[in-house]
Amino acid sequence: MLIAITSEGLETTSLVAEKLGRTPFLIFYETEKKTFETLRNPYANLFGGAGIQTSQLIIEKNADAVITIEIGLNPLRFLKSANVKVYSCTKKQVIEVINDFIENKLNLIELDSVINYGRKRHRGKRKRWYNNFNKKQGGNVMNHRLAIAIEEIGNNEIVAEHFGRCTKFNVCELDEQKKVLKTETFFNPLAGEHGGACQLPAYVKQFNVNTIIAGGMGQKAVSHFLDYGINVITAPGLSYEEALNLYIQGKLSGYEACSHGHRHEHHCN
């Protein structure tokens, strides 16, 4: 069994780092062979998405479990979608925490506990809305955020035919008149991977989007987005600009979940 432990240093005598995404190092321990491997976390100082990127690194190392002090909801969902268990610990040396794990003294972190903690923590603060334009919060109209899965062909950006294989996501913020206020680009950490689409909704969710557009999307990924309150639209065969303009004009809506390699028509009003 391979365990990943967040660490403040290179050695097993180092203290466990508090946050998964900001851990300077990851120490991997193989329980059967009793061997160690230490990696520097290249995403520790990332402005956004450090937890997801660090989780992806752990998944790529084929770890079975993670031990840390704190973890966010999105990285936890991301790891659990890859069947990686996450355990909580206190501030101790890495070697002490490993011994606690072997002796079954650590607690498994469940999604419900993190969700309930987040609800208590943010109770009384502003709530996030997902669905429609012109919905108000505390008297202020909230902007709408639209993510479009992009595939790059030469210098052209088209709506990715396969959601999970897109190269990046263009995220547009629209005001109540559906005017584009700004556009941000977030690269797909699973680009080129096969079968990673079900892990991506948690990654996209952290960008606070209300709607996602892709050429095609499997039912599991669709279900994850809908669970997060994010609208799904499938629109194959369009360029990025065409999809954005049709959406702004109110001519794109609806989705049809698809299996691998199967194309569907988008719904135009």
Image (tube, rainbow, N blue to C red):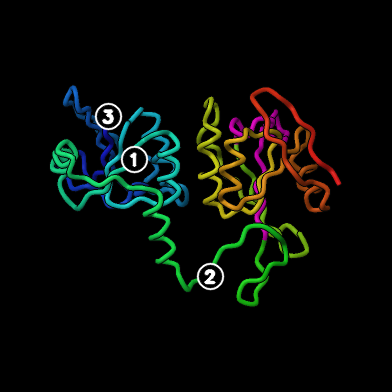
Q: Residues within 10 Å of mark 3 (few under 14, many from 20)?
A: some
Q: Residue at coordinates 67% horizontally, 51% vertically from top-left?
A: 146
- Give the alpha-carbon distance from disc 1 to disc 2, as whole Å: 33 Å
Task: Give the secondary structure at mark 3.
Answer: strand
Q: Is residue 150 visible?
A: yes
The answer to whether the residue labelled 1 contacts the one labelled 3, judged by CB atoms less than 8 Å apart, is no
Along the polypeptide, which appears first: circle 1 or circle 2?
1
Q: Hey, what amino acid is under mark 1?
A: Asn
Asked whether 133 or 154 is in front, the reply is: 133
Q: Quadrant of the N terminus?
A: top left
Q: Residue at coordinates 37% horizontally, 40% vertically from top-left?
A: 42
The answer to whether the residue labelled 1 contacts the one labelled 2, judged by CB atoms less than 8 Å apart, is no
Residue 268, horizontal then vertical, whole percent: 84, 43
Q: How many marks?
A: 3
Which residue occupies the extreme right position in the image? 269
Residue 191, horizontal then vertical, whole percent: 55, 31
- Label 3 sits on residue: 2
Magenta range is 144-167
Q: In the drawing, does residue 125 fall left or right of residue 132?
A: left
- Give the alpha-carbon distance from disc 2 to disc 3, as whole Å: 40 Å
Q: Residue at coordinates 74% horizontally, 41% vertically from top-left?
A: 240
Q: Is residue 155 magenta?
A: yes
Residue 237, horizontal then vertical, whole percent: 78, 32
Up the image or down, 111 lies above or below 129; here it is above
Along the polypeptide, which appears first: circle 2 or circle 3?
3
Up the image or down, 32 lies above or below 100; here it is above
- Give the alpha-carbon distance from disc 1 to disc 3, as whole Å: 17 Å
- Label 1 sits on residue: 41
Q: Is residue 152 magenta?
A: yes
Which residue occupies the extreme bottom position in the image? 139
